[in-house]
Amino acid sequence: MSDLLLVSGLSLATAAVLMTATAVVARAVGRIAVVDVTWGLGFVAIAAVGALVGDGPRRLLLLVLVAVWGVRLAWHIGRRAVGHGEDPRYAELVGDGGFGVAIRKVFVVQGLALWLVSLPVQVGASSAASWWPAVGAGLALWLVGLCFEAVGDAQLAAYRRDPDRPPVLARGLWRYTRHPNYFGDACVWWGIWLVGGLASGWLPGLLSVVAPVAMTYFLVFATGARLLERTMMRREGYPAYAARTSMFVPLPPRPRGPEA
């Protein structure tokens, strides 16, 4: 328990420092969306803290899993953001409230979310594994999620490079879910919960299940799919695409409306 309290306290401090630094940078460049780069790297930093001060072999496995996911995500978002203005999601979230509202609604919330969602990493880094089959299942689910993210992002990038592209991307993974990258994100963190939380025992698993639940909530309702869709629904062809395509979990397309 003392190891968990140490790792948890240092993780919370790490999240606070990272979000404070990100808020300073965001204010300087006039773009709140830089927080999306910190989001992935913040988890890597917390996993590194657990690997340094924790105990047990899973702390290194969790560091690798989180680092592969977090560095890839930060690199992808950072590269995509070059030459673009504010993300419409954050512009709508903050409105005319100014940077003070951004601090409260974005940086504080995401700092606390970093700490909360990383609970399975903290637990896994500070306790011994008692159920190794959960580790294997978690690795498999993590890999599925990473593939959904990477393939979905690659398909979206190829679509954007196509000069003859249709108004809406409805090919590949995007034929079955409107947000394959968000779905992949959720799978990654449910996998990490299996590796770090449930594999530590039923009680640590039960106490830390709030982490993947929170991540899924953020991806679907808070700063993810629902918020993005408010903007996307204004795009030509998107309402018809949305009517036949599952928003989150991949499903066969419904026979409604013409293909985009």
Image: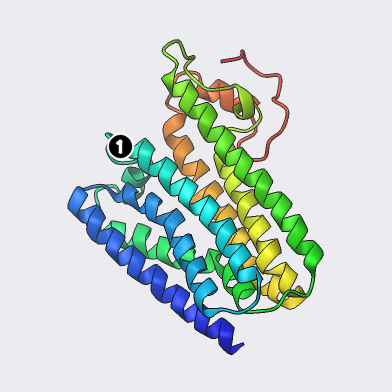
Which residue is pictured at 48% across the width and 61% down the height? 44
Q: Quadrant of residue 132?
A: bottom right
Which residue is pictured at 60% across the width and 28% down the height? 174
| Camera sees residue 100 | no
* Residue occupying the far bottom of the picture: 2
The residue beneath circle 1 is: 82
Please, is residue 22 above or below residue 11 in the view?
Answer: above
* Residue occupying the far left of the picture: 28
Residue 201 in percent (x, y) is at 75, 75
Label 1 sits on a secondary structure element that is loop
- The quarter of the image holding the C terminus is top right
Around disc 1, counting alpha carbons within 10 Å, would you say few (fewer than 14), some (14 to 19), or many (20 or more)?
A: few
Please, is residue 76 above or below residue 169 in the view?
Answer: below
Q: Quadrant of residue 161?
A: top left
Give the side of residue 78 with respect to residue 237, left or right.
left
Tell me the kind of residue under disc 1: Val
Give the side of residue 103 with respect to residue 194, left or right.
left
Residue 171 in percent (x, y) is at 60, 21
* Residue occupying the far top of the picture: 164
- The quarter of the image holding the N terminus is bottom right
| Camera sees residue 92 | yes
Q: Quadrant of residue 128?
A: bottom right
Which residue is pictured at 33% across the width and 70% down the height? 17
Q: How many marks?
A: 1
